Image (cartoon, rainbow, N blue to C red):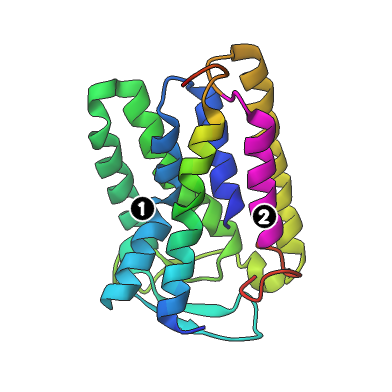
Amino acid sequence: MYAGHFAAALALKARLPRAPTWGLLAGVAVLDLLFGVFVLLGIERVTPTPGVPPGFILDFIDWSHSLAAALFWALLYALCFARLGVAVAYVMGVSVFSHFLLDWPMHPRDLALWPGSTGHVGLGLWRALPVGWWFVELAFVAAGCAYYAVRARRDGSFGGRWQWACAVVLALHVFNSPWLSSRS
Amino acid sequence: MSSTGIALFVFLGFALPIPLLAWLDRPRGHR
């Protein structure tokens, strides 16, 4: 999942408007930011598969994307925001762990339970539905953005340009579509 | 695309929208 993660951040912002927006957006991205760094450092491995959706095989992503790692990074991230109160710290942790929850339906069984575990999870919609996964994620993007838009219009303390924020998230999803992205 | 390219693509794909979306979320009239 890609744009769906940002839709989740907007929905969490709508749920707790006093949570810093940048923190939520970075929170939902943490696992993939770590993935990028870990691959560059040789700690995690990915194999390109041109022409075969989703364009790569995630050989080893246990330190960024396993269940235990996601919980660890979520807890660590939440602690970074502890000074802002329990509620904000909690929603920050949720933003990080939401990444694992949203990746689970899309990923093939490459999400380990813990680093080095032989047990892996993942519903595999990327492979089972080579085009349909995009519409599944679109439904989530639409739901998250709709919730954000409704709350932003009522609240007024955030989402000053909610139409554009939702348009950007939708544009990211279109960019990541099977028709426009070789990576899918 | 190499594995390094995929890593950079994913990293930048998640990092770059963050400041834009945070800016769009600011309340109207906020400087």
- Is disc 2 surrounded by few (<14), some (14 to 19) or many (20+) residues within 10 Å? many
Q: In the drawing, does residue B24 fall left or right of residue A37?
A: right
* Residue A17 seen from this side: yes
**Residue visible at 65% across and 83% down in the picture:** A52
Front one among B10 and A5: B10
> In x, y percent, where is residue A2?
57, 56
Identity of the amino acid at label 1? Ala
Position above or below: B20 against B23: below
What label sits on residue A70 in the rendered view?
A: 1
**Residue visible at 76% across and 70% down in the picture:** A179
Q: Quadrant of the N terminus of chain A?
A: bottom right
Position above or below: A141 against A2: above
Closest to the camera, between mark 2 and mark 1, is 2
Q: In the drawing, does residue A160 fall left or right of residue A114?
A: right
Position above or below: A174 against A16: below
Nearer the N terminus, badge 2 or badge 1? 1
**Residue visible at 43% across and 62% down in the picture:** B11
Position above or below: A30 against A124: above
A14 falls in the magenta region: no
Q: Which residues are magenta?
A: A159-175
In the picture of the structure, the residue carrying the numbered disc 2 is A173
Estimate the spatial distance between the alpha carbons at disc 2 and disc 1, rounded to whole Å.
23 Å
Q: Residue furthest front?
A: B31
Q: In the drawing, does residue B27 fall left or right of residue A181?
A: left
Where residue A59 sits, quadrant-wise, is: bottom left
Q: Main secondary structure of the magenta part?
A: helix
Identity of the amino acid at label 2? His
* Residue A98 seen from this side: no
For the residue labelled by badge 2, is the local secondary structure a helix, a strand or a loop? helix
Q: Quadrant of the C terminus of chain A?
A: bottom right
